Image (cartoon, rainbow, N blue to C red):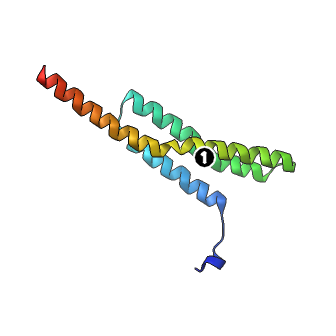
Amino acid sequence: MSKDKRIFDLEERLIDFAVRIIRMAESLPETKVANHIAGQLIRCGTSPAPNYGEAQSAESRKDFLHMMRIVLKELRESLTSDDTDKIKEKTKVIALRKRKYLIMT
């Protein structure tokens, strides 16, 4: 499909985003910290799609803009998912250092 004929379907893209967030959250280890991060990511990463759907039923332009701002805020919060990968990596390093320290003492 050419660029001119592609349909810009924000709702579908937001649903795909939510699915990626869920998959990433499911990939986190079973620890207290990871469960906390996963819960927060699931909340902020899955809410933009239904909020966008609600915005489509807005009663006024002002209401629509307000709902779209909420969608944007949730998406910005979800961008920390990139940071979550960094957190996972650093946590592994800390865990390895801790094991090494425990072995050496």
Q: Is residue 30 above or below residue 63?
A: above
**Dot 1: what SS?**
helix
Foreground residue among 52 and 77: 77
Give percent across and percent down for residue 47: 62, 44
* Horizontal relation, residue 45 to residue 28: left or right: right
Give the residue displayed 51% in from the left and 52% down from the top: 19
| 23, above or below 40, in the image | below
Farthest residue to the top: give it: 105
Provide residue 95's location: percent of width, then percent of height.
27, 31
Is residue 28 in view from this perspective? no
Q: Which residue is mark 1?
A: 75
Report the quarter where the C terminus lies.
top left
Which quadrant holds the N terminus?
bottom right
Q: Is residue 50 left or right of residue 67?
A: left
Residue 10 or 85: which is nearer the viewer? 85
Amino acid marked by disc 1 = Leu
Residue 88 makes an appearance in the image: yes
Residue most extreme to the left = 104
Residue located at (52% from left, 39% from top): 41
